[in-house]
Image: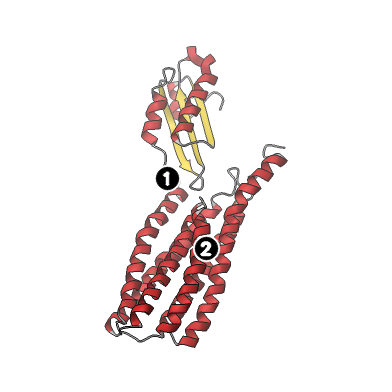
Amino acid sequence: MEVFKISKSEKQENHSHQNQPNKNIKIAFFTNFIFSMIEFFFGSLFNSVSIMSDAVHDLGDSISIGFAWFFQGYSEKQQDEQFTFGYNRFSLLGALITGVVLIGGSFFMIYRSIPRLIDPQPVNYSGMFWLSLVAIGLNGYAAWILSKGSSKNEGMLNLHMLEDVLGWIGVLVVSIVMNFTEAYRLDPILSILIALFILYKTVPEFFSTMKILLNGSPENVNVENLANSINNIPAVKDLSHFHIWSLDGEENALIVTVLIDSSDINKTREIKEEIAELAHTSGVKDHITIEITTSKDELEKGYAYGS
């Protein structure tokens, strides 16, 4: 049985295309993990609770990125008898875990910052200044790498890096200000603002990922317009079992059964080509299944001639 056989050239092309997200996520993982260890060391050296807290946060990031790395690699497996659509959706699990960690981490940042508003604590602003410069450079590089990707995983992980960059810019600003004044409350204020910004960016992305996992309609496809366009084809009398969903946020799929007159049965090929073209221009380019029937009863039951 060779239903799932893929040519060597296709495998090489797919591997080259799919390997980039895995490489980007690997860079983000090692950047976060190594720097979290550095933060633990210097946080202890500077006796800085805020740096130690950020080290815990970055370590949590590293764990979630590790999950994302694993799932991204797993998602690149070729289709087989168990998963005929392939393993693309496994990358969404990594994106979902990353979203949970980001949301949880943001609420944790707010929780830790509120007591500091009430009782400001002095910090080693000189050490914070130099460490923040290094952190901005490292996390900025990782964010730039991930911003060039298109997968859900890379999008979520880019928010991780963005969160860290903004956080360390806040640390840099606070360290400079505290060099001239004892306005220690600026630290928790900035932390809360950053956390709210990350929640604002992450929550929609989180629900978007959930929608894909629940087979929701792709956001880049106007489902109603596509259905109307198919119905407006002269040979099409009606349609049913019209389903559009996204496999992983990038590849979309369509299944539809259309009713035609028995006199038009010899036009089946042309009708399918016209529907496929409409689907393609609407954003469904990867997996299109069109079934034809000449019976109203069969239309309602999902029976069809051909595929």
Most extreme residue toward the top is 263
Q: Quadrant of residue 104?
A: bottom left
- Comparing 41 with 217, the one in front is 41
Q: Residue at position x 47%, y 64% from top? A: 161
- Given residues 244 and 131, the one toward you in this image is 131
Relative placement, left or right, of 87 versus 39 is right
Instruction: Where is residue 94? Give x, y as percent.
Output: 52, 59
Q: Are marks 1 and 2 in contact (CB under 8 Å)?
A: no
* Marks 1 and 2, the one that precedes in the sequence: 2
Q: Is residue 31 left or right of residue 96?
A: right
- Identify whether 88 is placed above or below 296: below
Reading the image, the residue beneath label 2 is 142
Residue 10 — which label? none
The quarter in which the C terminus is drawn is top right
Q: Is the image coloured rainbow, by chain, by secondary structure, or in one colour? A: secondary structure
Disc 1/disc 2 C-alpha distance (Å)? 31 Å
Viewport quadrant of the N terminus: top right
What's the residue type where badge 2 is placed? Ala
* CA neighbours of label 1 inside 10 A, class few (<14), some (14 to 19), many (20+): some
Q: Type of residue at label 1?
A: Gly
- Determine which quarter of the picture holds residue 266: top right
Does residue 10 lie above or below 39 as drawn? above
Q: Can residue 81 be seen here?
A: no
Disc number at residue 216? 1
Residue 265 drawn at (x, y percent): 52, 16
Residue at the (62%, 52%) spot, across then down = 19
Residue 247 visible to the viewer: yes
Q: Residue 90, percent across and down?
A: 55, 53
Q: Nearer the viewer, residue 187 or 244?
A: 187
